[in-house]
Image (spheres, rainbow, N blue to C red):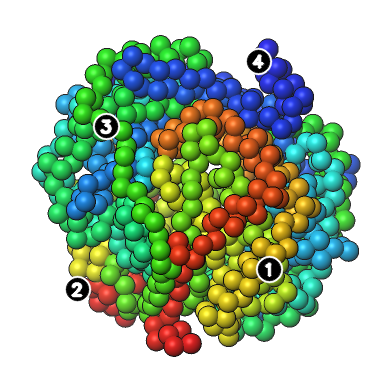
Amino acid sequence: MRKLILFISVVLFFPFSAFAADNVTTFTLKNGLFGVVIRDTRAPVVTHMVWYRIGAADEVPGKSGLAHLVEHLMFKGTQKHGPGEFSRIVAANGGSENAFTSFDYTGYYQRVAADRLPLMMELESDRMQNLVLSEKDVTTERSVVLEERSTRTDNNPGALFTEQRNAALYLNSHYGIPVIGWRHEVEKLTRADALAFYHKYYAPNNAVLVVAGDVDPAKVKALAEKYYGPIPPSKGLKPRNRPSEPPQLAARRVQFSDSRVSQPYVIRTYLAPERNAGEQKQAAALTMLAEVLGGNGINSVLGRELQLKQKVALNASAFYDGLSLDKTSFGLFVVPAKGVSLQKAEDAMDAVVAKFMQDGVDPAQLKRIKAQVRASQIYGRDSLQGMARKYGEALTSGLTVRDVRDWPNLLQAVTAKDIMAAARKIFDRKQSVTGWLMRANKEAGK
Amino acid sequence: MKRLIAQVLVIFLLAVPAHAALNIQKVTSKGGITAWLVEEHSIPFTALEIRFKGGTSLDLPGKRGATYMMAGLLEEGAGDMTATQFQTARDALAADFNFAAHGDSVSISAKFLSENRDQAMSLLKQAIEAPRFDPEAIKRVRAQILSLIARNKKDPQEIASSTFDRLAYGDHPYGSSSTGTIKSVSSLGRDDLVTAYRNSMARDRVYVSAVGDITPEQLGVLMDELLGGLPAKGAPMPPKAKIVLTGGVTVVHFPSPQSVAIFGERGIERTDPDFFAAYVMNRIFGGDGFDARLTREVRVKRGLTYGVYSYLADFDLASMLQGSVSSDNDRMAEALDVIRAEWKKMADKGATQAELDAAKKYLTGAYPLRFDGNGRIAAILAGMQLDGLPASYVKTRNARINAVTLADVARVAKRLLRPKDLRIVVVGQPVGVKSTD
């Protein structure tokens, strides 16, 4: 109870440091496992997550989709817990579980009653080192993954378009290769590929443990010692020096048409810097730039001009996510109104951005955005899973706990001048891809 | 290992009552509006959920899409504020309002900070009591909805569900998309939207829940302020839907590499004595666990899909037992064969004791975990009120799951899973799958 009172007064006293009240503690085990505990006693529930610093962008050429296939195979069992038993035990305890793969990380989680944490640690630490795979497991699960690719990507022209655009934006970085993998490469992934990848990267010194919920941090650390502590670190791990972008010297255009498209749109992405440890100011300015230009519909620069005033767009937005290990992208997006060509929509978008570069940031709008950023820190505390995810994602994308804590303050500190400086730097057409999603035989030639 | 689980479960069963003591207070305002409240003062904000029963099923003949568009316009200008002025005021307060129309309700979800609660609520009041439906906003939102309708026509998942709904519910509002058609939406005028607003948003059908940093007294005042100005009565509720679904296969040709299928037949009402048996049976048959029969047979053993599920689709005016699967065009026929075989097997033989035990453990264990987070709890409490459940349901629900026997599961499986009444709608270019009618 003492803690709770303290926590409220902190919020009241320093309204701009809501993050300081997030009750986060950390520890590192001897074998290199890094642990984060987020305490919240509102409900007797806990989220247990293990994040590995390995993602699709770490795959070697020709093996696209391997990180994601391994994620699927992690549910196939160990010597101690046979096929399906992990999931059966989680379900028998009323838990939910899942896993996810991104360019920079692979993560596993269970959400259970708080007193079930030791059991989850026992299961998760077991599969960190003892995975057993049969040939049939791999061939069947590869089929499942190919069906997943069909569902997510091949059945969705917008997703196919995104693949083509990313392949054009990143000349060298593996962010140009889809996380789920190119179909012809996924089809050839083998059991040996999966096991080699697993043995190399699934180890405590490559993992981040995040526990969020009604738990005592000291007890979580003791449990982590017990279950994860005995696992030896992987020896072959090297720093993640992945292929990086060379100077980009030519603007690129991608025009993708498909008979399944009914609503064309134009989207441009620029190569952009990411958040780096101790160096997040530029990313903070870009985050605010995206909000100013297109974060909130008709209340942002693009929406106000293109939707409300000129009426040439159904929707207009801007987007940027700085949470990335390597260089990422900043995007502009316009859905033209009926009868407006993609060329006209693109020209109008460019004109609005050009005018914005002249006019600068409206101080009242920036003030509103900062109020929302501050509120989102408060609303964000309502979702423990969201909090756990925020830390896991940051810590596997090259950031530290301190960077996560600094971030809200850095956003509050961004000035109109910072935003314009970041905008001038980012809007270089030579480092961009402009994409048109088109109906078959319709938009071409306009 | 088995022993360990058993021990843990004992502890857990003890833990359930403690947690189910979630303190739901019933708050009735001076003006006579009732809300369910859970006070949670540790984070300085409140999650507020408001529901108006009826939703898009109240659309008048020929006016399909009116309620959907109406809800989309609630944040597009109110009182003396234009859309821009309204949204500017909302953003300055960092309040979060969501307005949406669903098959059986119109929903308003709001999050607001304690420090500016009064201002945020007087703004929300404007949207609820005095939406403007400005011609300019109507034009803009209409164009967005028309674009959405056009997109849905080329989305295999949407084509499959709209085809299934038409076959299931015919002319009833449930038989068509709540967004309306290009034709109906194009012809909707301001008067139609005002009518939809008056018909669907009234005090005789409103349900409220709040979770967060707010006291019963504050909530009482807030409700009268927010909702007191609404008319006492809205339009009468529509009749139950007459289900016209027949067994068979419908193939809709669409140029995609993977086929999408929606399948189902008549379901079971929430008030039916066998509802809980059906709920448990469905967990065993088509739930989202790796051990559910459909997932085990279609995905885990054969790799024919990324996802296959069945679910009890219980609406206010109809109930369906429905499912979905996606499979590459050359594998859909096999996936459907496996699903049909499982359908029959469950109907003929019911479940095993081990399956029943596992389903009960999961369902009873997972239930208290849902009540995690102000926003989540508020949404659950609003849904319970719409379903006509008492607040005490959170304490009695698990006992009803635990009371289901193997015989109950077998009986309800035989009753609900009738292979000859199963309708399968497939969208794509499935090899070896033909329409039967």
Which chain letter goes with mark 3? A
Contact check, label 3 and label 2, Cβ < 8 Å: no
Which chain letter goes with mark 2? B
User: Left of B283 or right of it: where is A370?
Assistant: right
Residue picked out by circle 2: B432
Residue picked out by circle 1: A355
Residue picked out by circle 4: A3
- Disc 3/disc 2 C-alpha distance (Å): 51 Å
Q: Position of residue A424 (x, y in %)?
A: 59, 57
Count of all numbered marks drawn on residues in the image:
4
Which disc number belongs to residue B34? Answer: none
Please tell me in which quadrant of the rendered image residue A16 appears: top right
Secondary structure under the numbered disc 4 in the rendered image: helix
Discs 1, 4: same chain: yes
Name which residue lies at 49% across and 76% down.
Answer: A264
**Sooner in the amino-acid sequence: mark 3 or mark 4:** 4
Name which residue lies at 16% across and 26% down.
Answer: A79
- Disc 3/disc 4 C-alpha distance (Å): 41 Å
Residue picked out by circle 3: A238
Secondary structure under the numbered disc 3 in the rendered image: loop
Q: Nearer the viewer, mark 3 or mark 2?
A: 3
Discs 3, 4: same chain: yes
- Disc 3/disc 1 C-alpha distance (Å): 47 Å
Residue type at mark 4 is: Lys
Q: Is residue B52 visible?
A: no
Please tell me in which quadrant of the rendered image residue A397 appears: top left
